[in-house]
Amino acid sequence: MKPLSKTRTGRQNRIVLLTVLAVMIITFVVTLGICYHALQNESYARYVGIMDVAAEKIAKSVRGMEMNAKNVFDEVEKHLDSPEAVIAALESKASLNPDVSGYFAAFEPEYFPEKGTWFEPYVHHKDSSDYEMTQVGSARHNYHRTEWYVRAKESGESFWADPYYYYDGTDISGHYTTFVKPILDENGQLVCVCGADMTFEWLTKELQRINEEFKNDDMLKHKQSDFYIVVMNNDGTCIAYPDERSVSMTEDDVIHNMSQKKSGIVNMIIYGVPSTVYYGPIDHINWTAALVVPQHSLLKQLLTPALIMLAIAVIGLLIVWLVCRRRKDAEAV
């Protein structure tokens, strides 16, 4: 009878081991799924919060640039008695903000009769430190017909013009944006349109500072998150980004959301890496902040609990195996 007993015991032990293994696999998969969805929800809340904070920091930086430009424009408004006074006003404040490439004041036709139809003094960087003044208004450069001039004249309000690319074959060629403000007389009639031209270097520096600030945050270090922030125009074009990691949107629904200043999430392949992009509007300007998160960041966070659960499952299975083995040995005696 002993051989039969051993056979029955061995079969029972295998059934027990297989049952325990099946239960552990099911438990492991279900628990892993629960952890994954919990991490997804937690990551969503965290990354949306980071994106919102980044957007506010960028908006604050934009407001600072506006304030500096308005100081120059206010000086021009105080000195409208002669062309020379206008130029002197521009030159006196031009060095206040090294991130601005140049300031201009584009006047209405015949405002200064001696200057004729086009009078647009432009005080701009000559090199890294000096400025020079150039009269850029002319029949060839009829600024009265430009989008920014017409918009300023019609709205009577300050605004940021759409980013554009300027090329003249020199070192100053590049992507620019312009902060524009109309100057009105006491009757509400347009006198001139003032503007401050700037590249996106200041914004790129601000993004680098914000990214480093988040990466060094004690609350985020243990999350093993490899994310970065970019700024896009409302047409989906990336205008500022850190470390040459540009991101452009092509999906029509995402671009529509950006143009409507709405927030959203989109999954994309960026430089061959599956990524999730959290995007949202920046107050006071038609730009969008976007937080790019490689999807492997979430898997990194899931790795630790997965290894812990796997270790527990292996230890549990080993214990069951040892119990079954002792039971078999005891019955064999």
Image (tube, helix red, strand yellow):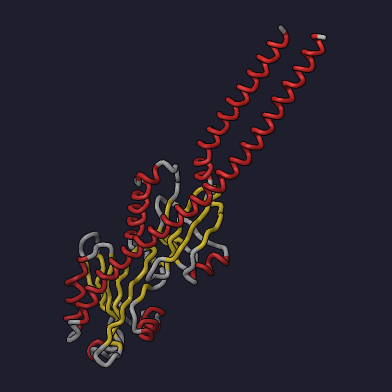
Q: In the rendered view of the protein, which quadrant contains the N terminus?
A: top right
Residue at the (75%, 17%) spot, across then down? 10
Position of 307 with respect to 153 (left or right) is right
Above-or-below relation of 331 to 103: above
**How far across and how far down the image is residue 62, in percent?**
33, 66
Above-or-below relation of 213 to 222: below
Residue at the (45%, 46%) spot, across then down? 226
**How far across and how far down the image is residue 69, in percent?**
26, 71
Q: Nearer the viewer, residue 83 or 235?
A: 235
Determine the image quadrant of residue 178: bottom left
Residue at the (63%, 39%) spot, across then down? 29
Q: Is residue 284 in sight in this rendering?
A: yes
Above-or-below relation of 18 to 139: above
Q: In the rendered view of the protein, which quadrant contains the C terminus?
A: top right
> Please, which residue is most extreme toward the top here?
333
**How far across and how far down the image is residue 34, in percent?**
58, 45
